[in-house]
C-alpha cells in the first residue's frame, strides 16, 4: 500500500495547513502598525500554530477569507 494515502499522512498534511485567527488589540501592536490601523481598536491576526504571523487584517471575516483563498484551514483562537 502506498503510504501517502494512509489516514495519518493525510491528517499530517491537513495540520500543515492549519492557521489560527485571533483578535489583537491595536494598542498591543508596535507603533508603526498602530499608525496604519486608523481608528480601529482591534485587528485580526492570521498565524501558524508555531506563532508565525502571516497577516493582520481589519475584520474577522476578511481573516477567514484570506486564509481560505490561500488554501489554509482557519480556526478561531481565543
Image: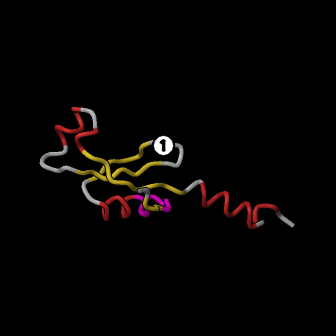
Q: Residue furthest left?
A: 39
Q: Quadrant of residue 7?
A: bottom right
Q: Residue furthest right?
A: 1
Q: Residue 26, percent across and down?
A: 24, 44
Q: Residue 33, percent across and down?
A: 24, 38
Magenta span includes 38: no
Mark count: 1
The magenta segment is 67-73
Residue in the picture at 69% in, 63% down? 10
Comparing 62 with 39, the one in front is 39
Q: In the image, is 12 to the left or to the right of 17?
A: right
Residue labelled with disc 1: 51
Q: Residue 16, percent across and down?
A: 59, 54
Quadrant assignment for the N terminus: bottom right
Residue in the picture at 53% in, 49% down? 49
Residue in the picture at 46% in, 62% down? 75
Q: In the image, is 28 to the left or to the right of 22?
A: left
Q: Secondary structure at mark 1?
A: loop
Quadrant assignment for the C terminus: bottom left
Q: In the image, is 14 to the left or to the right of 78?
A: right
Residue in the picture at 24% in, 54% down? 58
Identify whether 34 is placed above or below 19.
Answer: above
Q: Residue furthest front?
A: 78
Crowd tier of the residue under label 1, counting other residues whose Cα lies within 10 Å: few below 14, some 14–19, many 20 or above: few
Comparing 34 with 70, the one in front is 34
Q: Residue 63, percent across and down?
A: 35, 58
Amino acid at each position: 500500500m502506498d503510504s501517502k494515502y494512509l489516514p495519518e499522512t493525510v491528517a499530517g498534511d491537513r495540520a500543515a495547513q492549519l492557521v489560527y485567527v485571533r483578535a489583537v488589540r491595536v494598542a498591543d501592536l508596535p507603533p508603526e502598525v498602530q499608525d496604519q490601523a486608523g481608528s480601529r481598536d482591534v485587528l485580526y491576526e492570521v498565524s501558524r500554530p508555531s506563532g508565525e504571523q502571516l497577516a493582520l487584517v481589519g475584520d474577522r471575516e476578511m481573516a477567514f477569507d484570506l486564509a481560505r483563498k490561500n488554501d489554509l484551514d482557519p480556526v478561531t483562537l481565543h
